[in-house]
Amino acid sequence: MIRRAAAALVLVALTATACGVQPSGVISGAADDAPSGPASTIPGAPGVSSIYLVSNGAVVQVQRPGLDQTDAALIDALAQRPTSAEKASGYTTEVPRSALPAAVTVSAAEVTVQLATDVQALSSLAVSQIVCTLHLRDAPDGSVFTLVGGGNVRSGERCG
């Protein structure tokens, strides 16, 4: 009986080796090994997003559920009218619908936002809404924003 068990064990070991199964370290299932921090979202998937709206002459961060998690969708949300709940709380937007469509390019130290409107005609609050909203999402620390549109460029923009 022991010989049979030993033979079976050798057969299993040879089969596993022949299949290319490589030895590995201990795989732990401890909760301490789990990643920490906020859950990531899939680009394009609806979720709760932070956008910047205007309240009492300043841009303020507002949570808005149901937005696609893309840069273009966030700029689109800024150009839409505030929701009824946001409006009731006194929030407005300075980003005009004429700014759409928008495209965003992110590099190591710069974020370029291409808008369909003349960026020189945007109010400082509209620029802050766009820059601060995108800064939260994907701008590396210390990034400078450049807005391009209508044949004009606004460079050196930062959130804050």
Image (tube, grey):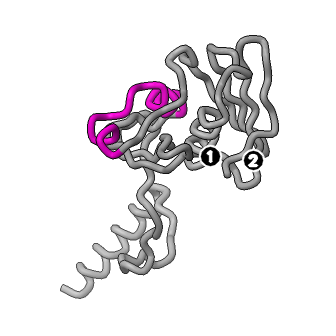
The residue shown at (45%, 78%) is 26
Labelled pair 2, 1 in contact (Cβ < 8 Å): yes
* 79 up-or-down from 33: above or below: above
Q: Residue 128's quadrant in the figure?
A: top right
Residue shown at 56%/46% (left/top)? Answer: 58
The answer to if 153 sits in the magenta stretch is no
Across and down, in percent, residue 137 comes to 56, 46
| Residue toward you, 146 or 52 | 52
Look at the image and give the residue range highlighted in magenta.
Answer: 71-89
Q: Is residue 72 left or right of residue 2?
A: right
At 44% from the left and 30% from the top, the residue drawn is 77
Name the residue carrying label 2: 143
Q: Quadrant of the N terminus?
A: bottom left
**Residue 37 position in % (x across, y down):** 47, 66
The residue where tag 1 is placed is: 135
Q: Amino acid at mark 1?
A: His
Extreme residue toward the bottom, this view = 2
Q: Is residue 103 left or right of residue 155?
A: left
Q: How many marks?
A: 2
- At label 2, the amino acid type is Ser
